[in-house]
Amino acid sequence: MLHQVEASHFQPLLGIVHPLLLPDGRVLKARIDQIDLKPQAQMPGSRMPFAVALSVEGQIDFVDGLCALELPGGGVLEGLFVSRVPNMGRDAGTAYFQVAFN
């Protein structure tokens, strides 16, 4: 199913908080902050690569791993590799993550 997901699927979810299910069973409230298209990485005949930026308020020890994201309407995207990105001058009380779709 992940190979069928496109950036447009995330567009209506921008700014909305969704449960992010971690590999250890914990659930984080993750806000979808941004969708970045990656046209220079596109192979002929394939979907447009993109990345989804997420943020979670609070001190979180999770760094990266296979997660699931609950979507409105009861759908769940499973097998998402979520990786932490540095705060780089942003709010130190927030954890920032990214999911890349190639």
Image (tube, grey):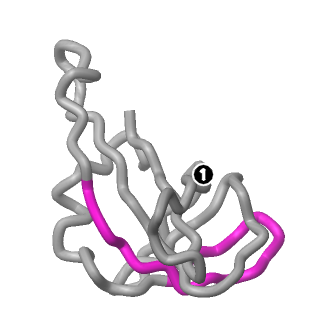
Amino acid of disc 1: Ser
Q: Main secondary structure of the magenta part?
A: strand
Tell me if 3 is positioned left or right of 40 in this view.
right
- The C terminus: image quadrant: top left
- Report the residue at 40% width, 86% height from top: 17
Callout 1: SS: strand
Q: Quadrant of residue 35?
A: bottom left
Boundaries of the magenta span: 19-35
Q: Position of residue 28 (x, y in %)?
A: 62, 82
Q: State the residue lying farthest toward the top.
A: 44
Query: Is residue 34 covered in magenta?
Result: yes
Is residue 79 visible to us here?
Answer: no
- Report the residue at 39% width, 41% height from top: 101
- Report the residue at 18% width, 13% height from top: 44
Q: Quadrant of residue 11?
A: bottom left
Q: Is residue 37 above or below residue 69?
A: above
Tell me if 101 is positioned left or right of 42 in this view.
right
Q: Quadrant of residue 52?
A: bottom left
Q: Position of residue 81 (x, y in %)?
A: 59, 49
Q: Which residue is mark 1?
A: 83
Q: Position of residue 45 (x, y in %)?
A: 18, 18
For the image, the number of numbered tags is 1
Query: Is residue 27 covered in magenta?
Result: yes
- Report the residue at 42% width, 49% height from top: 1
Q: Is residue 40 above or below residue 3?
A: above
Q: State the residue lying farthest toward the front.
A: 89
Q: Position of residue 100 (x, y in %)?
A: 43, 43
